[in-house]
Image: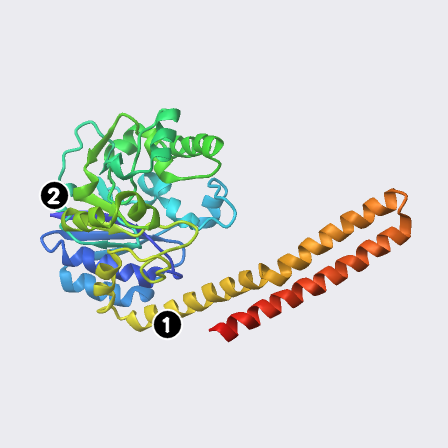
Amino acid sequence: MRMNVYLTTGKKNYKYAYVAIKSLFEHNIDSEIYLYIVSEDLEDSDLRYEHELAEQYGNHIMILRFDEKKASEQIKLRENDHWAIGTMSSYWLFHELLPEEVDRIIVIESDTVIVGDLSEIYQIDFEDAYVICPGPEHKPKNHRDFMERIGGECLTFVLSMYNVDRIRKDFTLEDILKTDADIRAKAGNSMMELVFGLLFAGRIKYIPGKISCIDENERYIEELGYDYLAECEKTAKIIHFSSYGDYSKPWNPVFLVPGYAVWWKYAADSPYYKEYIERQWSYYNKTRQKQQKIARNISYRNILIAAMVIMTAALAFLSLMTDAGVIGSAVVIGCSVISLGVSVLIRRVSILIGKVKK
């Protein structure tokens, strides 16, 4: 059975997608997979190991070109948003990127590991639906409330499957981009889950998240709990390591979740394994440098000096505005300097006493 799969990545992160690709092939040996990698800069020569994997399993990898410069004229992300604009290539998927023979396609992402056979989901009858995706039960309440408020439905992008033929027939690319503009007016930025959740409202078929896709990150482990996530891993088809501004991924574990162990099992066999480890050190060092910089800026001494300067300036100004005049201002400044010195001295003595006790 042919299975069309969509994934987007680029030169910066494609090596991490090796885990998603290998686990996809390994768990779907009864399907002939056509993996469409949408990228603005990847060449076939970059994917030497991935093509070897595809040949080994009897599958195929095709690179579809995505024009980020053209897309940036239509798509607006917040400044310093951790999403790359390439992730919005799904807007162009149906009308400009996919070959005509593709009638349906299932979505995975680079930051995933596939842990089950996707063919059962791939063969589900769309009936009158445009998309099939994991249910909304794992979505945050504020996300569900927002979609209800704007008249849409929750859509989970990872492991969503699209009725390409029907979408091409019933919608144009302009319809998709117009919906994106509506979402930007309401939410402030582009987001494909919101766009497709609004555009396809009433025609979304759900599969329970517990048996389809489980997202693992800091918020989900706090809301759903470790035990629930661990149970979902036994029945779900895919684990998605979604993240926020902290960019918590298996290869940059600023926050540990159980699924990271599954990802690293596949990573250990990757030709990029050494690079994963070395990049992790780099990420850690950068994070540590930021922490040290913040620590320096919020140190006891800096806070004390800032408070003293502000207080002294305020009192000196008040002295000038009253009968105290210049002499009063000078007295205030002098007292402040003495107070600062005494405070620092007390601090040093307290530290010394603490060391002596220890």
Instruction: Indicate the amino acid at tag 2.
Output: Glu
Q: Secondary structure at mark 2?
A: helix
User: Residue 176 appears in which quarter of the rendering?
Assistant: top left
Q: Nearer the viewer, mark 2 or mark 1?
A: 1
Crowdedness near tag 1: few (<14), some (14–19) or many (≥20) residues, C-alpha within 10 Å: few
Percent of width and height locating residue 74 = 47, 39
- Tell me the residue that label 1 is attached to: 278
Give the number of the disc on residue 120.
2
User: Residue 102 appears in which quarter of the rendering?
Assistant: top left
What residue is rendered at 61% in x and 70% in y?
349
Percent of width and height locating residue 221 = 29, 48
Q: CA distance from mark 2 to mark 1?
A: 38 Å
The answer to whether residue 240 shows anywhere in this view is yes
Crowdedness near tag 2: few (<14), some (14–19) or many (≥20) residues, C-alpha within 10 Å: few
Instruction: Indicate the amino acid at tag 1.
Output: Glu
Indicate the colouring scheme.
rainbow
Which of these two is toward me, 299 or 181? 299
Percent of width and height locating residue 65 = 37, 52
The answer to whether residue 102 shows anywhere in this view is no
Which of these two is toward me, 66 or 216? 216
- Left or right: residue 229 versus residue 246 is left
Q: Secondary structure at mark 1?
A: helix
Q: Are marks 2 and 1 in contact (CB under 8 Å)?
A: no
Above or below, 316 against 253 in this view is: above
What residue is rendered at 31% in x and 46% in y?
222
